[in-house]
Amino acid sequence: MNIALATFSLLPDGSDDVQDLIGALAAEGAAAEPVVWDADVDWSRRDLVVICSTWDYTARRDEFAAWAESLPRVLNSAAIVRWNTDKRYLRDLADAGVPVVPTLWDPDDIPSQWPEYVIKPAVSVGAGDTARWGPGEEDAARAHLRSLREAGRTAMVQPYLSAVDTAGETALVFLDGEYSHAGRKAQILTAGAGVQGSVWGDPTRGKVTASTATEAELELAARALAAVPHGDDLLYARVDMIPGPDGAPMLIELELTEPALYLRHAPGSAERLAKAIISRVR
């Protein structure tokens, strides 16, 4: 077997997940290596490409999606990549009845109905170009919104849910269609900090700890995954959610393209993912 684990040029050896997965695959007799997604390589030599830590595609999303479509075999699929790398997929899930954090798309002005809110681009990773705004920051928030629109980027505006500061954000990880484990992400956005760069490479933000999913969280994840178009053959999925005002979980993101899977927080998870990859190749 010749398996490529796709990453990006600033992380040529791949993420922690990639390194753990290489070891787990080797234990099963399968050869795998990290490969930079936009490198000049012969992808036809690979039995399978697994997209892992390709965290620089946001400025070249169309090129990235076209690359996925050019591969002989890739997971998750190229159709998933094109759908999931633009957060406008949240509209599809909301239309399907999934409880999604309320979102204004390309609004003309900042919201008046929420005391605190988040502005971010629809194509981003790791909270890049995202900010939390509140009272007294209207001018800066308008400038942020305007900068995204003027750059031709779809802007999203969502209420800042206060439970993030206490309960955090929960991420449920699914491997080969089955629930595997959960992680709890600490607060990422800081009040008054303005527009922030990606959380990638910054250990001070969004620290993850192991968690246990509740029945309500599992139910929400199942509803979200059931609503995914072309979602019958997902190798991995991460379902991110936050408690809403009434305490019930609400979907914030559905990560199906290049999510951190927190394999080191769940013993045995790298081995389970390795077995799923090998079964797909065979």
Image (cartoon, rainbow, N blue to C red):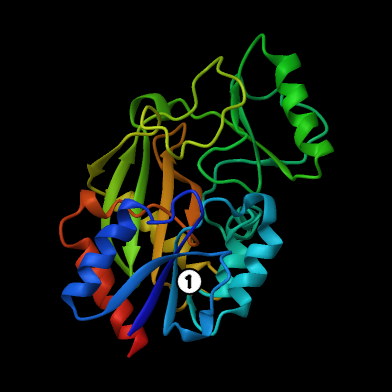
Residue furthest out toward the top = 136
Residue furthest out toward the front = 40
Quadrant of the snapshot with the N terminus: bottom left
Pointer 1: what residue?
Answer: 76
Q: Which residue is drawn at 43% across and 48% down?
A: 240
Asked whether residue 37 appears in the rendered view, the answer is: yes
Please state which of residues 172 and 159 is positioned toward the viewer in this rendering: 172
Q: How crowded is mark 1: few (under 14 residues within 10 Å), some or many (20 or more)?
A: many
The quarter holding residue 167 reads top left
Residue furthest out toward the bottom = 282
Horizontal side, residue 25 vs residue 59: left or right: left
Give the answer, above or below, for where 238 lies relative to 170. below
Horizontal side, residue 80 vs residue 34: left or right: right
Please state which of residues 251 and 171 is positioned toward the viewer in this rendering: 171
The quarter holding residue 81 reads bottom right
Expressed as whole percent of the image width and height from the top left, the position of residue 14 reads 38, 56
Please state which of residues 184 and 82 is positioned toward the viewer in this rendering: 82
Expressed as whole percent of the image width and height from the top left, the position of residue 159 reads 58, 31
Q: Residue at x 31, y 52 (%)?
A: 16
Disc 1 marks a residue whose amino acid type is: Asn
